[in-house]
Image (cartoon, rainbow, N blue to C red):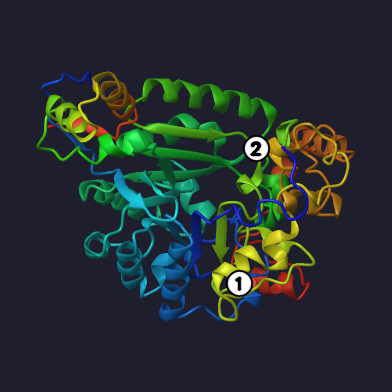
Amino acid sequence: METVGLEQNNNTRPLWLLAELTYRCPLQCPYCSNPVEMAKYKNELTTEDWIRVMQQARKMGATQLGFSGGEPLVRKDLEDLIKEARHLGFYTNLITSGVGMDEARIVAFKEAGLDHIQISFQASNEELNNYIGKSKSFQHKYEMAKLVKRYEYPMVLNIVLHRKNVDQIRDILDMTVDLNADYVELASTQYYGWSRINIDQLLPTKEQLKNAELVAREYQQKMKDKMKVIYVIPDYFEDRPKKCMNGWGNIFLTIAPDGSALPCHAAGQLPGLEFPNVIDHDLEWIWDESPDFNKFRGTSWMKEPCKSCDEKHKDLGGCRCQAYMLTGDAANADPVCGKSEFHKKLHDDVEHIGKLAGDEKFEAKPLVFRNMKNSKNFTDKKTPETV
Amino acid sequence: MAIELKKEDIIEIVPTFRFQWEEVQNCYVVLYPEGMVKLSQSAGEIMKRIDGKKSIIDMIGDISAAFGGADVEKDVLEFLETANGNGWIRTK
């Protein structure tokens, strides 16, 4: 079925509201999905602003609300926001590192009506976990995860996988079993922003992935009915692109700490966007009318090879950020696609890193950690600190 | 672990799932961490009667009465099996 013009313009609704309450975070993970230029964002929305945003999104039909960041626990008004969100009928998800949490807050969140807590781990052992997050957080996370289950929340444990921890996937899964997780997200690093800077140190090898996939499948079978294991391989190794965010401006709405509305939390890096702000506009206008949310909606913006591709409705051309990063034009096909003229280069680059992986000198290259100082250096075009 | 349901079983919605009416979508939904399933009208009619007090057989009678004595047993059992498989419901 073909529609002409701004198709789906009035049919799509934001079902998922991601509230990035702050970019402040006690951790410094070198693959963070926050923008590298986060130091530029000075202002944070007030409690009243967030409540207005939640009311508008709920009225438009949003059901899922993620409190994220940065570390959302940094916000002192989190309990109030949860209470209001629950009152509005949202299913409320807290996406946290666990740092800044204690038993009293877990109880307070429960009283406020929080539905679910997702805790991230950086690894299954203290040393690597604390190294990656640059924070002595492992023991605390472990205790918090136990408490989350004691207070009968459904719990998701999220572990971002990369070359430095993917070989420990069995230990990681055993840890999630011990902690009685309901869901485990083994999220392969997506190479945007900070992780793109650190790709040489983070990209896993093909052999590592093959092994990881086998172990993940084994636990999916073994833990069926008890713990749902979600494992996604990094798409750099694929030939077909993913339907990123389920389509631009289709169901997903991110609000950045300063109130900028984005169709995806990584879209801040794309040139030519205006970043409509919830201080100046209501969500209805932002979603339906703003140039940003219509820019890559549906299929009418496509160029070849997407335009004439019979899979264009299936993957919607893949990821716009990846297209921009790897080809310089956000309207190009995602180079993960075998039909993209940039596909070969991507696979060559991946192979190149795969060959160097394990080499002592190559592995010794330091990580660029995600912190405001490094962000400021990037924003000012200075060399980032690596230690 | 999802267990097999018997008609005499009293069932309830597992508290880690939320079942509610959505005005904008005009349907009942089941909500869980970071996800949502929209329910058909008949599935909604079944789910809203799960209260931790009624047995499956009572629910079948109740739904049948609400729809002019229609034979709904097969549909109800089929849906409950799916719901059970998804972990949404459990016996009391």
Q: Which residue is mark 2?
A: A234
Mark 2 crowd level (few <14, some 14–19, many ≥20, 10 Å Cα):
some
Kindly indicate the quadrant of the structure image that contains residue A39: bottom right
Locate the N terminus of chain A and report the quarter of the image it occupies.
Answer: top right
Q: Position of residue A244 (x, y in %)?
A: 65, 45
Mark 1 crowd level (few <14, some 14–19, many ≥20, 10 Å Cα):
some
Q: Position of residue A220 (x, y in %)?
A: 44, 25
Could you tell me which secondary element the residue under label 1 belongs to? loop
Kindly indicate the quadrant of the structure image that contains residue B3: top left
Q: Which residue is mark 1?
A: A260
- Which amino acid, mark 1? Ser
In the rendered image of this protein, does residue A355 appear above or below residue A292? Answer: above
In the rendered image of this protein, does residue B62 appear above or below residue A247? Answer: above
State the separation of the CA atoms marked 1 and 2.
28 Å
Between residue A227 and residue A114, name the one nearer to us: A114
Could you tell me which secondary element the residue under label 2 belongs to? loop
At 49% across and 27% down in the image, what residue appears? A216
Q: What number is the disc on residue B19?
A: none
- Which amino acid, mark 2? Pro
Tell whether A112 sits left or right of A380: left
Locate the C terminus of chain A and report the quarter of the image it occupies.
Answer: bottom right
